[in-house]
């Protein structure tokens, strides 16, 4: 039956923990003939040393380049032949995966998932080719001002001993040094069912979907699978740190300004998120959009985000401006941060942003992907299957003082990291 | 509930498409005007896109500084996009809140203000948007390739417009463009989602029925003459990566050959739905010839339906160690092969199955369905979308070869190279 409540909850999400530790969740949606899978396992970049940066990501990308049962061509023929998609994506804490297909092809998709996760062989010729593609991608990013600014921001905001200091994808220096055997070793050590979550959403009966996942992955065992290390303690920023990255030939400068923010489990996460909505999202990019874009015409975009993952991800403002306007834009951003951290938001702003944050839930859950990622987040952060139904109450209980306290805790006008990437102040 | 599409034309010429869908809490409302960069003259390039920006600055009843807040407060999402052939505005809202979107779009069809100070501020925002695009090497290359491929037709210029025009266009230019093209008889309105069609149609009549029709907009008369030889352009700018574009003149969406080329595109460059949603292309012929062979880091194919003949474009990202002439030779060899030998029945079958899957993905959400219905109604009919898989399925292997022989020939192509000139860069604390 198609769920009548558009917000997923305990009555229409089926959850089962397999004997090997994999948690499987499923929700039905028969409005389109497609199905998506989404999930993760704890094989993230947190296991990379600075010298081996990119090893976890390289490993995940290479999973689709050959297994004991299928070579490169066979894997992709099996996927593309049915119009299906499967991909892996590594972050600091986990290796995520996602796929979609017609509902009739879910067994094929799951078989490819288990085959690539469990039996990759990292063929030497394909690994070398993939390395070349990764290097080309990294070179393109060296000239991407948004990427350069964000990378410099992370290096300023997090110390070298913290994983968030680094880019999970590796660098032009580390990728050439990662050997095929290092990928195979990383897979052997870190890929296993413990801590793995699989979500299936679409035109498949929920119990049948879970049975299909169990059939594909229930036989996977790995007794010695290590658990990820704890993140090191992080001290708040106490000064202003700035880096200007010169990228020649560019006509726009990108700015990233902010500091480490709350983790998802921190009690003030929701207050920080709602304060950020006022700062840089609500009503076309919030107060930042109004000040920097609408009133001064300085930028095409100016907005802010609170990451809020497993650890203290950044709370940061991002803007793209003409190189001649960088200092004016930075000053405007700081003025908005001063305002957010010195005076409580108005009752009207609070009410508007609560309505926005809670009212958008149905929209965010419109597609199968949207529902699958919401369920994955609930399971990953142990929020409970009724979390989305409780969400409006959580948000509506927040006060202006809660928001002020959260903003003051994380954002400080005299202690922040600022990275600017562009052609330089004279435009060349 | 009957979920087929209903089409109505109001007395003032407004075309209305209604697609009710059960089991969704949402409605998506879209108003699409039949105007885009295709309708622009030299000196006013980018005007359609700039007008789109000005439509967010408000009307006397819906002040600009309140618009975003009103939509957001109701849990809605709204946006707009300007394309070569159209400019479209949409709101996707909880179903019981959609009236705000209906009222807002009816109001700004006639009452947008274009206040001079707002125009001045938006000029710098638009210039900033163009500068952001200029940070991408492919923007420079694509702009040069389009300009070389279209000497006469307005597909010549980028949607964002030429910088010279962005500096000189006036408030009155923008306002006149708005008045000329933003009329009910030049618009298509689409509702998709949870609603009662009869009540929805009544409400649309109430809000839009009294808007007077305008003069028919001027037709686009500058037909591109036939291309009679290969054209080549080079862009030399900072960077480390070399890019190549092969762009072939291709037929309009209503040409029967369009579907043959759609299959050809899928076999060569991988599947995509009308140039939108795509899946991986690692079994496509060009991926195998260029990426698996180690010559390129990536290859993508771009081909989508347009009102007038446009381009069937192959984008190649070279690996740093690749010889550009070897890449062109390998590409030409693949194109020659598909002209000389028919594709296999299995390749054809795969292209159709892929299209069916992508079509299913595209119907998961109301916003996407609203987009496709309006998009296709613009160049032909909403039925073009509904019959997409069926018409693709009617293509034969011989059709594909004939289309390759007719369209993928050097005389019809523009070749663009992005040559990186340097790597000097660094960080300053």
Image: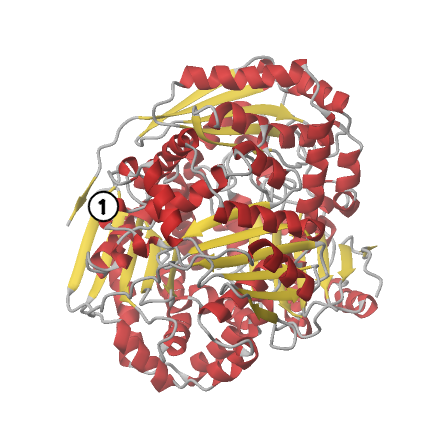
Give the image location of residue B101, x and y in percent.
64, 66
B233 sits to left or right of A55: right
Q: Camera-side residue: A354 or B91?
A: A354
* Position above or below: B230 against A69: above
Give the image location of residue A90, x and y in percent.
40, 52
Q: Camera-side residue: B256 or A213?
A: A213
Q: Which residue occupies 80% across, 55% down?
A: B5
Q: Which residue occupies 56% across, 32% down?
A: A73
**Secondary structure under the numbered disc 1 in the rendered image:** helix
Image quarter where the N terminus of chain A lies is bottom right
Within the image, what quadrant is residue B37 found in? top right
B193 sits to left or right of B327: right
Q: According to the image, label 1 marks what residue?
A: A51
* Position above or below: B200 against A344: above
Within the image, what quadrant is residue B99 found in? bottom right
Q: Chain of mark 1?
A: A
* Position above or below: B27 against A34: below
Give the image location of residue B189, x and y in percent.
71, 56
Image quarter where the C terminus of chain A lies is top left
Q: Which residue occupies 74% across, 46% down?
A: B377
Q: Is residue B150 visible?
A: no
Q: Camera-side residue: A76 or B429?
A: A76
B387 sits to left or right of A95: right
């Amino acid at each position: 039956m198609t769920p009548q409540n558009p917000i997923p909850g305990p009555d229409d999400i089926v959850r089962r923990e397999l004997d090997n530790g994999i948690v499987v969740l499923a929700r039905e949606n028969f409005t389109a003939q497609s199905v998506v899978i989404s999930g993760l396992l704890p094989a993230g970049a947190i296991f990379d040393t600075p010298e081996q940066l990119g090893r976890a990501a390289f490993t995940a990308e290479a999973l689709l380049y050959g297994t004991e049962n299928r070579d490169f061509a066979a894997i992709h023929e099996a996927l593309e032949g049915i119009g299906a998609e499967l991909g892996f994506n590594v972050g600091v804490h986990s290796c995520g995966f996602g796929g979609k297909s017609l509902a009739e092809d879910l067994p094929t998709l799951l078989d490819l998932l288990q085959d690539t996760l469990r039996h990759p062989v990292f063929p030497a010729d394909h690994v070398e080719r993939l390395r070349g593609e990764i290097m080309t991608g990294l070179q393109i990013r060296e000239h991407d001002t948004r990427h350069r600014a964000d990378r410099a921001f992370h290096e300023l905001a997090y110390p070298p001993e913290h994983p968030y200091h680094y880019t999970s994808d590796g660098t032009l220096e580390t990728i050439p040094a990662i050997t095929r055997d290092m990928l195979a070793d990383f897979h052997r050590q870190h890929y296993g069912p413990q801590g793995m979550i699989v979500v299936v959403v679409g035109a498949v009966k929920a119990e049948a979907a879970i049975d299909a996942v169990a059939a594909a992955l229930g036989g996977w065992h790995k007794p010695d699978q290590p658990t990820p290390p704890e993140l090191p303690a992080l001290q708040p920023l106490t000064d202003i740190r700035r880096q200007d990255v010169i990228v020649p030939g560019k006509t726009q400068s990108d700015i990233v300004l902010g500091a480490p923010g709350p983790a998802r489990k921190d009690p003030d996460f929701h207050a920080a998120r709602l304060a950020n909505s006022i700062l840089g999202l609500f009503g076309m990019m919030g107060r930042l959009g109004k000040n920097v874009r609408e009133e001064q015409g300085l930028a095409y975009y100016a907005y802010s985000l609170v990451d809020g993952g497993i650890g203290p991800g950044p709370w940061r403002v991002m803007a793209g401006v003409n190189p001649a306007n960088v200092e004016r834009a930075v000053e405007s951003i700081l003025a908005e941060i001063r305002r957010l951290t010195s005076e409580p938001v108005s009752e009207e702003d609070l009410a508007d942003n609560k309505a926005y944050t809670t009212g958008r839930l149905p929209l965010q859950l419109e597609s199968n992907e949207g529902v699958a990622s919401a369920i994955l987040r609930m399971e990953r952060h142990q929020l409970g299957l009724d979390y989305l139904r409780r969400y409006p109450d959580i948000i509506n209980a927040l006060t202006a003082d809660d928001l002020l306290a959260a903003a003051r805790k994380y954002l400080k006008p005299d202690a922040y990291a600022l990275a600017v990437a562009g052609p330089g102040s004279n435009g060349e | 509930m009957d979920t087929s599409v209903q089409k109505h034309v109001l007395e003032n010429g407004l075309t209305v498409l209604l697609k009710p869908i059960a089991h969704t809490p949402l409605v998506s409302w879209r108003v699409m005007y039949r105007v885009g960069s295709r309708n622009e003259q030299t000196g006013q390039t980018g005007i359609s896109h700039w007008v789109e920006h000005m439509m967010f600055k408000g009307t006397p009843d819906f002040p600009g500084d309140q618009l975003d807040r009103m939509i957001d407060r109701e849990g809605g999402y709204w946006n707009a996009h300007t394309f070569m052939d159209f400019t479209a505005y949409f709101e996707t809202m909880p179903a019981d809140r959609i009236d705000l979107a209906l009222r807002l779009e009816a109001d700004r069809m006639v009452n947008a203000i274009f206040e001079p100070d707002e125009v001045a501020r938006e000029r710098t925002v638009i210039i900033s948007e163009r500068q952001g695009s200029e940070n991408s090497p492919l923007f420079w290359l694509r702009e040069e390739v389009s300009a070389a491929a279209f000497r006469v037709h307005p597909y010549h210029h980028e949607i964002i417009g030429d910088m010279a025009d962005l500096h000189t266009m006036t408030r009155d230019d923008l306002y006149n463009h708005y008045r000329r093209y933003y009329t009910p008889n030049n618009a298509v309105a689409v509702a998709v989602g949870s609603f009662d069609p009869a009540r929805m149609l009544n409400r649309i009549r109430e809000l839009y029925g009294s808007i007077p029709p305008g003069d028919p907009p001027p037709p686009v008369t500058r037909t591109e003459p036939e291309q009679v030889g290969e054209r080549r352009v080079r862009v030399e700018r900072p960077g480390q990566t070399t890019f190549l574009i092969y762009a072939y003149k291709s037929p309009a969406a209503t040409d029967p050959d369009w579907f043959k080329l759609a299959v050809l595109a899928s076999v060569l460059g991988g599947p995509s739905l009308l140039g939108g949603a795509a899946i991986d292309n690692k079994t496509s012929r060009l991926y195998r010839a260029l990426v698996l062979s180690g010559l390129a880091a990536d290859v993508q194919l771009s081909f989508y339906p347009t009102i007038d003949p446009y381009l069937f474009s192959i984008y190649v990202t070279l690996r740093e160690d690749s010889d550009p002439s070897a890449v062109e030779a390998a590409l030409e060899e693949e194109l020659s092969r598909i002209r000389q030998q028919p594709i296999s029945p299995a390749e054809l079958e795969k292209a159709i199955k892929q299209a069916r899957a992508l079509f299913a993905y595209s119907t998961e959400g109301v916003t996407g369905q609203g987009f496709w219905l309006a998009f296709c109604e613009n160049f032909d009919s909403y039925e073009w979308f509904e019959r997409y898989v069926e018409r693709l399925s009617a293509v034969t292997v011989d059709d594909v070869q004939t289309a390759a022989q007719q369209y993928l020939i050097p005389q019809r192509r523009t070749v663009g190279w992005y040559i990186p000139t340097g790597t000097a860069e660094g960080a300053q604390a």
